[in-house]
Image: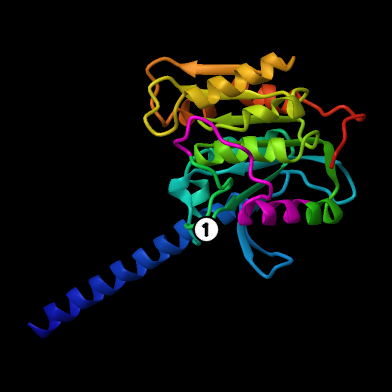
Amino acid sequence: MKKRASSWIWVLSVAVAVAGIATVRVAAADEDQGFAAQKYVGNNGEELLYRFHKPAEFDPNAGPYPVLIFLHGAGERGNDNTAQLKHGKDFLLKAANEQQCFVIAPQCPRSKRWAEVNWFAPTHKMPEQPSDPMGLLLELLAKMQKQYPLDTQRFYVMGLSMGGYGTWDLLQRCPGKFAAAVPICGGGDETGASEVVKTPVWAFHGDKDGAVPVARSRNMIKALKAAGGEPKYTEYAGGGHNVWDRVFNDPEVGNWLFSQKRPTETKTE
């Protein structure tokens, strides 16, 4: 009886050990794919957690390399520095490998937003100051410009839901800085459309979105066109809030995004 009990204890110990190894492997999976966990401490002492992926063939003496900023949605907020890669990781990994670009995927704290605005309002004015995490992201980007050979003509930003609002906010807050933007089911300040009219935008939304009114994307596109812009807009018939999987699985999105380049005469500040 004691021998049988010992055998079961041994089996259980092995199972626990194997489970422990599996847990470690899962936790390290993103690191293995090149998404290094990083932390930026801002000028005010606050922290911004982010995942950072270097180009697949990065050479510090080569370049310059393009940069893609990815802003996650409200459901991925937190402090685990992992959830922000829940959606779109394959798209980001492909970009890093095929487009030879840097990828910055910050994580917004649970009580914060990329843009401190009402997501359900029919319209909003861009806040005078960036949200805390957005301000830290801008500081981080400025630091990286000094640390790495970045192609300032090829800064890109994309985001979904809360990150869609953040994408519009970042684009309008830094007019002329980005070569292109892909806001997914978000909204911006329509009164400031003329400031970013020259920046290529491809926006996406589902016409049955029950979380973010589809009018937010429609109205931004309308405002950009009225100001003389030529934005792209894809509205998925019957699509709900989660249309980003369709966006990430469309190869034309990446092709279009990385084919854009900011003119040298456009202001960068």
Q: Position of residue 233 (x, y in %)?
A: 58, 17
Q: Of 190 and 165, which appears nearest the observer? A: 190
Residue beneath disc 1: 109
Residue 149 in view (yes/no): yes
Residue at 72 percent across and 23 percent down: it is 200
Q: Of 99 and 116, which appears nearest the observer? A: 116
Residue 36 in view (yes/no): no
Q: Is residue 58 magenta?
A: no
Q: Height in image: 181 above or below 50? A: above
Q: Height in image: 205 above or below 166? A: above
Q: Height in image: 171 above or below 82? A: above
Residue at 50 percent across and 62 percent down: it is 79
Apparent side of residue 267 relative to residue 83 in the rendered image (left or right) = right
Q: Position of residue 50 (x, y in %)?
A: 61, 55
Magenta stretch? 119-141
Q: Position of residue 266 (x, y in %)?
A: 88, 30
Q: Position of residue 73 (x, y in %)?
A: 49, 43
Q: Quadrant of the N terminus?
A: bottom left
Q: Amino acid at mark 1?
A: Pro
Q: Quadrant of the C terminus?
A: top right
Q: Determine the image quadrant of residue 257.
A: top right
